[in-house]
Image: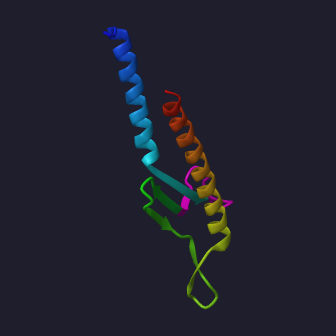
Amino acid sequence: MPTSPELKEALKSAADRIASYVDNIATMTVETSYVELDGNPDQPKLAARSIVKLDGDSQTTLPMKKGPDGILVVDTIVNEIHQQNVQAATDYRTKMLERLLSLFNKS
């Protein structure tokens, strides 16, 4: 069954959008930043970063501070906030993947 040029273009456009979406979800980066109360709110400083790839590889930069004895320790409050952000981003990505897969299952 021959297809019209318009249908071919529509299918190509849809395939391009799906490929772009898959590229965008292949790597998820979550950054948690801070600003000092008397600082410039337009120039936040990075406090923690997590990069999670679709293949399961991940990289995390932890928020550290010097303890009273001068030894570096994880800033637990900032780390907890960051982990909540990572979980929210992971949950969102999971929902989007499920929706994308459901489109293919309907076919």
- Residue located 51% across and 61% down the image: 49
Question: Can you give x and y, in whole percent of width and height, for residue 47 in the image?
Answer: 56, 64
Question: For the view shown, which residue lies furthest in the front direction?
Answer: 1
Q: Which residues are magenta?
A: 35-48
- Residue located 68% across and 69% down the image: 77
Is the stretch drawn in magenta largely helix, strand or loop? loop
Q: Above or below — where is 28 with respect to 38?
A: above
Question: Can you give x and y, in whole percent of width and height, for residue 40 in the image?
Answer: 60, 54
Question: Can you give x and y, in whole percent of width and height, for residue 25 in the image?
Answer: 46, 45
Q: How is the image coloured?
A: rainbow
- Residue located 56% across and 70% down the image: 63
Question: Can you give x and y, in whole percent of width and height, for residue 79 in the image?
Answer: 62, 68
Q: Nearer the viewer, residue 24 or 103?
A: 103
Q: Quadrant of residue 58?
A: bottom left
Q: Nearer the viewer, residue 103 or 40?
A: 103
Q: Above or below — where is 11 with respect to 19?
A: above
Q: Above or below — where is 55 with respect to 3?
A: below
Q: Nearer the viewer, residue 92 or 82?
A: 92
